[in-house]
Image (tube, helix red, strand yellow):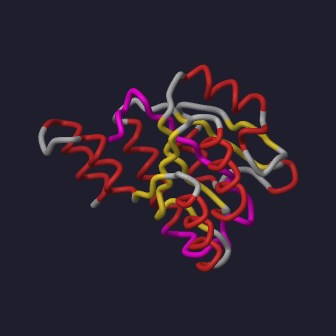
Amino acid sequence: MLKPEECVLVVVDIQGGLAGIMEQSEALHQTVLKLIQGLRLFEIPTLWLEQLPQKLGKTSPMLSEELIKTCSPISKQHFSGWNCHDFREQLQQSKRKQIILVGIEAHICVYQTCLDLVKNGFEPHIVVDAVSSRTAENKRIGIEMMQERGAHITNMESLLFELQHEATGERFKQLLKLIK
């Protein structure tokens, strides 16, 4: 069971022209945006990765405008975020083990980051409607590979309501507004 005090959101490489050519790109962006906003209601910290932003471009504006409110991008050159010292250090300093993982591409950067997280004792939760690849087949394969290697599979609404636990209170009302 996910616990807000144990979670960190990791946003992987939703940037530049590549973000726009992902399978169901608009739906991906909307889901990630709702997830960022929803997780903020639980005070869950975010780590935001960008793959070679000087070459691939910055994070999509609709997401970066929301992310910049609570964190700064971490530039990386390896496919796995784990190989980035700043990312690894911030994650370890959080002392949180449940990783909510979203981003692109499911079969490359998200997959390799997930694999390294599992190898290093973390518990990744892949939000399947908040990850994508250029093709549906690559997304499917990426999700399967992550699940086979120990990742938990979820979706945005299931995850938010798992964190919420009960259908009462102001946060519940805000979550309902957010997902509708």
In the image, 105 versus 97, the foreground residue is 97
* Residue shown at the point (55%, 60%) measured from the top left: 148
Q: Quadrant of residue 38?
A: top left
- Is 19 rendered above or below residue 114? below
Q: Point out the image quarter for the N terminus.
A: top left
In the image, 33 versus 75, the foreground residue is 75
- Residue furthest to the right in view is 55
- Is 15 rendered above or below residue 135? above
- Is 121 rendered above or below residue 104? above
Asked whether, in this view, residue 103 is left or right of residue 42, the answer is right
Q: Point out the image quarter for the C terminus.
A: bottom left
* Residue shown at the point (57%, 70%) measured from the top left: 25
In the image, 148 versus 72, the foreground residue is 148
* Residue shown at the point (50%, 27%) measured from the top left: 96
Residue 9 lies in the magenta stretch: yes
Q: What residue range appears in magenta?
A: 1-27
Q: Position of residue 99 (x, y in %)?
A: 51, 40
Asked whether, in this view, residue 83 is left or right of residue 119, the answer is right
Q: Position of residue 26 (x, y in %)?
A: 53, 69
Q: Quadrant of residue 15?
A: bottom right
Q: Position of residue 138 (x, y in %)?
A: 65, 74
* Residue shown at the point (41%, 57%) measured from the top left: 154
Asked whether, in this view, residue 38 is left or right of residue 70, the answer is left
Q: Position of residue 110 (x, y in %)?
A: 65, 55
